[in-house]
Image: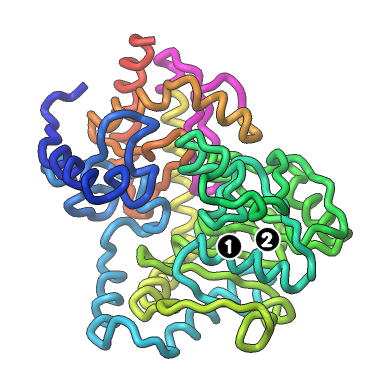
Amino acid sequence: MNETRTHTRSSALFSRAERVIPGGVNSPVRAFRSVGGHPFFVASAKGATISDVDGNTYIDYVQSWGASILGHGDPQVIAAITEAAQRGTTYGAPTAAEVELAEQIVADVPGADMVRLVSSGTEAVMTALRLARGVTGRDRIIKFAGCYHGHSDAVLAAGGSGVATLGLPDSRGVPANAVADTIVAPYNTIPAIDEQIACVIVEPVAANMGLVAPTDDFLRELRAACTRAGALLIFDEVITGFRLGRGGAASHYGVTADITTLGKVIGGGLPLAALAGSREIMSALAPTGPVYQAGTLSGNPLATAAGLRVLSLLDAKNYELLTQRVARLARGLSEVIADAGLEVQVPVVGSLLSLFFTDAPVHNFDEAKRAANTGIYANFFQEMLARGVALAPSPYEVAFVSLAHGESEIDRTIEIAASAARVVAEAK
């Protein structure tokens, strides 16, 4: 490992943080529990890199968990935020930018006639579930094991992301009756859907148990099963929306959901999310309908300004460039890790990729857990970090490449991975 990197200031900050913040972090996966050690504390970030308070710089594949598709601190996004901030930071009243962002989402997302802006993916999903129940008059929902839909009570059952990282099947503090109407099915399997089911919610591309793509007909058959039963299909595209293309996973796979939740990219790195659907469904939301939802900071002017600027820069050429770079990174990682003697799968969907240290492709949460439980990812993570590459601090997350990751960053990452993999293999 590279002994020249010191973490004195980060360690001191983490000790201070543990005294005043539960676990020292404000989102559990940041604590490095599943990979060991303590988190580094960020001082700044630019483009493809992130720097900590000790002066260490890393090629960053977290990119704020996919929100920074242009890279950190894109000058055009910063300029849009600055211009908006000079007019005020929040009003509690409508703005033109809210309308413009909603119009852009309607233009790009299949099945979207209307949009409600909120402040987080959790809030978007919580509202989507309430809306589905309100529209159908039914209570039961179906989710899939390993798919993470935020931390609202109803979906904290067999979740991925931080829930999987901590080894928790659910959460204390969630009443039994809050999940009594939540049915959990294996991903890539069509569950029994009857007239009691209000909705089925799914990550169309699972990205919170590592990257697990849908099998060939999974989404299409799920769409048909929901239609037959009169249940709504919800695509949680908080990660995939505007990441796999302007139409997200819905366009990528040619399957349209009844309600789509969005986040990450559409906020340009600021807190913003949305739910979108048909006019008939969305009109059930207050104030035009009986399903209540509200938010003080919903449609925040800084976030909408950032989101609009990001979306204006995401054209077909940039999506193709991003996809090509991810494909090259995936090929390189697969080759050098295998050459070192480690069994690895590097699944790719568009501009998303992840690492599973196992000998066979992963299709569901049980298989993802078996790969994670080898412990190899944690060792690989630490060796990469020591050499200047920051991966997600959990085997259940994906790697995010931004448009700021150029050929040199890709080449350097592959080179570092070869060295890290050899060390990990030798230590087995």
- Magenta-drawn stretch, dominant element (helix, strand or loop): loop
Q: Residue at x 37, y 73 (%)?
A: 303
Amino acid carrying label 1: it is Val
Q: Earlier in the sequence, mark 2 or mark 1?
A: 1
- On-image quarter of the N terminus: top left
Q: CA distance from mark 2 to mark 1?
A: 9 Å
Q: Residue at x 55, y 66 (%)?
A: 124
Badge nearest the viewer, 2 or 1: 1
Q: Nearer the viewer, residue 276 or 241?
A: 276
Q: Is residue 227 above or below residue 36?
A: below
Magenta stretch: includes residue 97: no
107 left or right of 24 in image: right
- Report which residue position mark 2 lands on: 234
Q: Residue at x 49, y 40 (%)?
A: 353
351 left or right of 270 in image: right
Marks 2 and 1: CB-CB under 8 Å? yes
Residue 158: image quadrant is top right
Give how far across and how far down residue 148 sits, in percent.
56, 48
Residue 159: image quadrant is top right
Magenta stretch: includes residue 349: yes
State which region is magenta: 336-361
Give how far across and how far down residue 354 sits, in percent.
48, 37
52 left or right of 234 in image: left
Q: Which mark is residue 125?
A: 1
Q: Can residue 415 be spotted in the picture? A: no
